[in-house]
Every structure is written in structure tokens, then in C-alpha cells.
Image: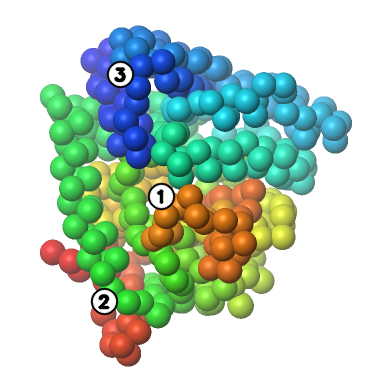
């Protein structure tokens, strides 16, 4: 497991991420929520102490255990599934930051729960996420998260816990004397690539690999973002495209765990912006029900690329946070079905109204689910001038 020194460094990185992701500086008496699973309690204690020393009010909240989650989804009435406890909305309106320490004790404990019940609860929680999205755009709120090694994660990744922990240490630079300096260096390098991508006038992108042939249209008023401090680790650079311009085939060669369910071999066929043909080697029924959670869950919300020169992740980790940032031999491309990220809007995000989002082709679903492809691939930008430019090949952006 992580040593005391490594956890102290982890906490420093998370606070760097929280500060970097926020548009305005934190002030004394701001409030930051620390959500954590029980195995990460020591890291939560370290974070609490650091926040107190900053003059910030930490609010600690232990997440539900696997048994509690199973009880909730299997025993709740319809009213209980959609119930929001008193105080949740006022808290969302006042929080200045949130840190989640993901340390699951089980990954498949909800496999026997009807996915429609999970979807119903997810939709009910969307009103809180909308508050956080609005306040983030205003510069009053930021968030970040990380993963803490557990036996359940290691088992599903088919790794001994010691080796699993070592991969987390390497990916997050916890073996460096100054890991924050490492992240600052990657942050600067990524900014050069984002500037390069955002300087192009794009009609659409074509993504090609052995099992992928996908066309993605960025749409108007878009910008590439990423490596912003919001996820630790995060090596991806991404955009939320105009979902209406999506067509072709995407295949996820990496498995995925979601809401206590395991899925693998997901194949998505898009026509007129919608995933109209959905298959999976395992967990197909769950995938289909999740992508019918609401009317826009089957539409694209994110298109992302990870440069293998940044990422130190080279093995399956049974967790999306790490797997969507896979570097390995050929980097990765992933797409998310469901909600878009409004901070990919190139204008003032505070002016991105619901009507404007709809006009620009942003997706506003309660779902956001990443599907990862690690095959050797080429991404070609089709410019508005009629020219074509390869922007990503063999796991790297072509910008030097």
C-alpha cells in the first residue's frame, strides 16, 4: 500500500489540481468537500490537515459501502431512488471545491440490480451536477479526484496489490521528490499542443484503427482542453464535439467497470449523431439500458486523445480514471457517451445558456461514460480549407 510519504505527496498533488482547475484563487473560509471510500481514510485525514492549515473549511463525507449501495438500489421505492436529502442543494451552491478519493471495495456488487433503477437515481442527481457546472463556469468552484489502491481494484486488474500500488505511484509521480513540479511540466507541454489544435479551422476529424472508423465534427465555438488538474492522473486532451456530426464505428478494446457492472468488447455504430447499433461481448444489456437512461445518453459528449509521451500508464487498471489515460505502445483514443463538458466552449462559459448549448450541439445527458480504444491509430483533421493534416499517429500528437 502507499507509504505515509507517498500519501503526503498525493495530497499535495490533489491540492495543486484543485487550485489549478479553479479560475479564481481559494480564499480563507472557503469550503472544500472531501468525499472518500473507507480504505482511503488516511489520505482523507492528511488532506483535512492541509486544508485546515490553508484556512479552508474541510467537510468530510464517507461514501456508501458496497452493501449500502446494493441496499439502496435493490430495496428503494421509486420515491427513495430520486430523493435528495435536505441541504444538498444549498451545500452545492456554497461549496468552493470538492476532492473525491476513489477507493472501491467492490467493482461488481451491483451486477444483479436492474440498470434502469441505477439510471433513475443518476438522472435525479443531475440537478446537483448542473449547479456545480454553473458555479465552475463562474469561477467559484473546482473539483479533482484520484484513485487509492484496493484489493478489489488489483484483483480485477489481475495484479498483486503491491504491483497495482506501484503503477499508481509511477503514474502520479509519487516516487519523485517534487511530484507537483512534474505535473507542472506536463501542464506546460500540453498547453502547447492545445494551442496548436485550437489554431486550426476544422471541418471534422477521421479516426482510423483496426476496429475504428469514426467521424467526429467539433462544431462551432469549440476548444481542446485537458490536463487541467481535475483528474489525478490526467494525460488526455479532449473536446466536446457537436454530437450531430458523429458517424461511423467506435470499438472499445478495453473493458470497463460501471455502477458495479463489468462490460467488455463494446461496439458503437453512429448514424446522424446517435449510437443506433450497440453490441458488447459481455454486459450488452447493461450498456443498452445505460445508453437509454435519457433521450440523449446515446449521443457523443467527448472525444479524447492521450499522448504516450505524457502517460506512464501501461497496463489495464480496472478503473476509468487510469484506463482513459492509458499510454502504453499506441496511446489511446476514447469517446464518452452522454454529457458534454461546457468548458470546451471557446466563448465565455457563463453565457452558454441551455438554448445555446442545444444550438451548438452540446449534449446535456445525466450519463457520462468513457469507452477506450488502445489500438494503433491515425487521426486526420479535415480542414475547412479542404486540406488534410494528420494530428495523431502511433500514440503521439504530430506536433513536436
Q: Secondary structure at mark 1?
A: loop
- Earlier-in-chain disc, 1 versus 2: 1
Determine the CA span between mark 1 and mark 2: 22 Å
Picture disc at residue 324: 1
- Earlier-in-chain disc, 1 versus 3: 3
Identify residue for label 3. 7
Please tell me whether residue 190 is drawn above or below residue 73 in the rendered image. below
Asked whether residue 389 is in view, the answer is yes
Q: Secondary structure at mark 3?
A: helix
Q: Residue at x 55, y 17 (%)?
A: 61
Q: Percent position (x, y) of residue 202?
A: 36, 77
Q: Are marks 3 and 2 in contact (CB under 8 Å)?
A: no
Q: Quadrant of the N terminus?
A: top left
Q: Percent position (x, y) of residue 363?
A: 58, 60
Q: Residue at x 52, y 56 (%)?
A: 352
Please tell me whether residue 169 is drawn above or below residue 345 in the rendered image. above
Q: Residue at x 61, y 78 (%)?
A: 272
Please tell me whether residue 56 is drawn above or below residue 296 in the rendered image. above
Picture disc at residue 390: 2
Q: Percent position (x, y) of residue 266?
A: 56, 60
Amino acid at each position: 500500500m502507499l507509504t505515509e510519504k507517498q500519501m503526503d505527496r498525493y495530497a499535495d498533488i490533489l491540492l495543486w489540481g484543485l487550485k489549478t482547475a479553479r479560475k479564481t484563487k481559494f480564499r480563507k473560509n472557503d469550503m472544500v468537500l472531501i468525499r472518500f471510500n473507507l480504505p482511503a481514510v488516511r489520505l482523507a485525514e492528511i488532506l483535512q490537515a492541509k486544508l485546515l492549515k490553508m484556512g479552508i473549511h474541510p467537510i468530510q463525507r464517507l461514501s456508501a459501502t458496497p452493501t449500502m449501495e446494493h441496499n439502496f438500489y435493490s430495496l428503494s421505492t421509486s420515491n427513495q431512488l430520486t430523493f435528495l436529502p435536505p441541504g444538498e442543494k444549498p451545500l452545492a451552491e456554497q461549496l468552493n471545491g470538492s476532492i473525491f478519493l476513489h477507493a472501491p471495495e467492490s467493482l461488481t456488487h451491483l451486477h444483479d440490480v436492474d440498470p434502469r433503477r441505477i439510471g433513475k437515481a443518476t438522472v435525479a442527481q443531475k440537478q446537483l451536477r448542473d449547479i456545480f457546472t454553473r458555479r465552475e463556469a463562474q469561477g467559484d468552484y473546482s473539483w479533482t479526484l484520484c484513485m487509492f489502491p484496493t484489493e478489489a481494484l488489483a484483483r480485477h486488474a489481475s495484479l498483486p496489490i503491491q504491483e497495482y500500488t506501484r503503477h499508481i505511484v509511477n503514474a502520479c509521480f509519487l516516487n519523485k521528490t517534487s511530484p507537483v513540479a512534474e505535473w507542472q511540466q506536463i501542464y506546460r507541454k500540453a498547453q502547447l499542443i492545445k494551442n496548436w489544435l485550437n489554431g486550426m479551422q476544422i471541418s471534422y476529424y477521421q479516426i482510423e484503427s483496426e476496429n475504428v472508423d469514426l467521424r467526429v465534427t467539433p462544431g462551432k465555438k469549440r476548444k481542446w482542453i485537458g490536463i487541467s488538474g481535475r483528474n489525478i492522473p490526467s494525460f488526455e486532451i479532449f473536446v466536446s464535439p457537436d454530437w450531430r456530426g458523429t458517424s461511423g464505428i467506435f470499438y472499445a478494446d478495453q473493458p470497463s467497470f460501471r455502477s458495479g457492472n463489468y462490460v467488455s468488447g463494446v461496439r458503437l455504430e453512429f448514424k446522424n449523431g446517435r449510437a443506433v447499433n450497440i453490441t458488447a461481448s459481455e454486459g450488452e444489456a447493461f450498456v443498452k439500458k445505460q445508453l437509454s437512461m435519457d433521450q440523449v445518453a446515446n449521443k457523443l459528449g467527448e472525444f479524447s486523445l492521450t499522448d504516450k509521451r505524457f502517460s506512464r500508464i501501461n497496463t489495464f487498471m480496472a478503473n476509468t480514471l487510469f484506463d482513459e489515460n492509458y499510454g502504453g505502445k499506441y496511446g489511446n483514443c476514447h469517446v464518452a457517451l452522454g454529457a458534454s463538458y461546457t468548458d470546451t466552449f471557446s466563448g465565455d462559459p457563463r453565457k452558454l445558456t441551455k438554448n445555446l448549448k442545444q444550438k451548438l450541439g452540446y449534449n446535456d445527458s445525466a450519463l457520462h461514460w468513457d469507452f477506450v480504444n488502445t489500438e494503433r491509430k491515425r487521426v486526420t483533421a479535415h480542414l475547412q480549407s479542404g486540406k488534410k493534416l494528420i494530428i495523431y499517429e502511433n500514440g503521439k500528437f504530430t506536433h513536436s
